[in-house]
Image (cartoon, rainbow, N blue to C red):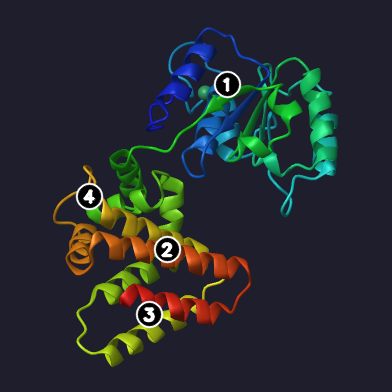
Amino acid sequence: MFAHILGQTKAVTFFQRAISSDRLSHSYLLHGPDGVGKRLLAEQIAAVLLCQREQGEKPCGNCPGCQKYLSGNHPDLLRITPDGPTIKIAQIRGLKQAVTYAPFEKGYRIILIEDVHTMRREAGNSLLKILEEPPAQNIFLLLSASLEVVLATIRSRCQLIPLYSLPFDLAARIIQQKDPELPPDEAFMLAQLADGSPGKALSLNSSSLYPLYTESLEALLAQRRSEAEKVEAGLALAAKWTTLKDDLPYLFHLFRIFFKDAMVPLVFDQPGTSRMLWLDKARERWNFRQLSAKIDNIDYAEQALQRNCNKGLACEVLALQLLT
Ligand SMILES: [Zn+2]
């Protein structure tokens, strides 16, 4: 039923059982880090429930229900995503209106609400009223990456389904399925950098941040003889970092992971990868205390950014410290 969803065994098994024994609740809240498969799982649940085949594998892909689903406009699948930064009250009012009618087809209507934590109180209260007296044959699938921020009243109306970060090797496999040209060690490194979230790893890979990250590590670890060379390299790096806007704290975060990993050799590191070569170089170059000082330098630069200190200056200071 959910054969092509890799990982998330607990959540998948839960829904397989609930669907095959026909014991579904009205509302579920799927929560877990970004990019680990919440939307994919919710869409699969919708596909299974909207399939009209009586017996055998679902979704069948052929029945009228599946065809409408695959065409992207099944009338019994309602999707709500944030309109700008938040889900607006008008969207929930529209939903309220829609669910007063029975589903178009004879089965279920699925209401998929993404980033439910972006709802302000007014919209949240309006949704709560629907969840408190859910109309028959409607199944609500709410998704959120930050469970704590979802209104407590909404949380309490839903069955909570946690999804987790994936083991790095599994995440790397998924990344490679999506991007077959990516060498295995790059996929593994991206999985590590994205904390086991294939979605995050793929967006990191397609952003300009990842090349800058690898370029920066190469530059930091290159052999330089004179102080003047170091200063020149540091200023050149800082100039590139300074061009980043919202991604700069994330770049710093990636550096922190690298220096932490250099301090503590990890069991799952694969020998022979470019990441291992960098880590080995870092361990040769700096001792434990120096690596730890670099992490402090990164923390300090992050705090400087948060205090709105001069970004260029913060980057220059950090680049020179990391090169030393
Ligand atoms: Zn079907």
Q: Amino acid at mark 1?
A: Leu
Q: CA distance from mark 2 to mark 1?
A: 52 Å
The residue identified by callout 1 is 49
- Residue 55: x percent and y percent? 48, 11
Q: Residues within 10 Å of mark 3 (few under 14, many from 20)?
A: some
Q: CA distance from mark 4 to mark 2?
A: 19 Å
Q: Amino acid at mark 2?
A: Asp
Vertical order, 66 against 169 (above or below): above
For residue 298, side relative to residue 78 (left or right): left
- Of badges 3 and 2, the one in the foreground is 2
Q: Residue at x 64, y 15 (%)?
A: 25
Q: Is residue 99 visible?
A: no
Q: Quadrant of the C terminus?
A: bottom left
The residue identified by callout 3 is 320
Q: Residue at x 83, y 32 (%)?
A: 125
Q: Nearer the viewer, residue 239 or 226?
A: 226
Q: CA distance from mark 4 to mark 3?
A: 25 Å
Q: Is residue 24 visible?
A: yes
Kindly tell me whether mark 4's CB lies below 8 Å from ligand 1.
no
- Of badges 2 and 1, the one in the foreground is 2
Marker disc for residue 296: 2
Q: CA distance from mark 3 to mark 1?
A: 57 Å
Vertical order, 21 against 11 (above or below): above
Vertical order, 243 against 111 (above or below): below
Q: Earlier in the sequence, mark 3 or mark 2?
A: 2
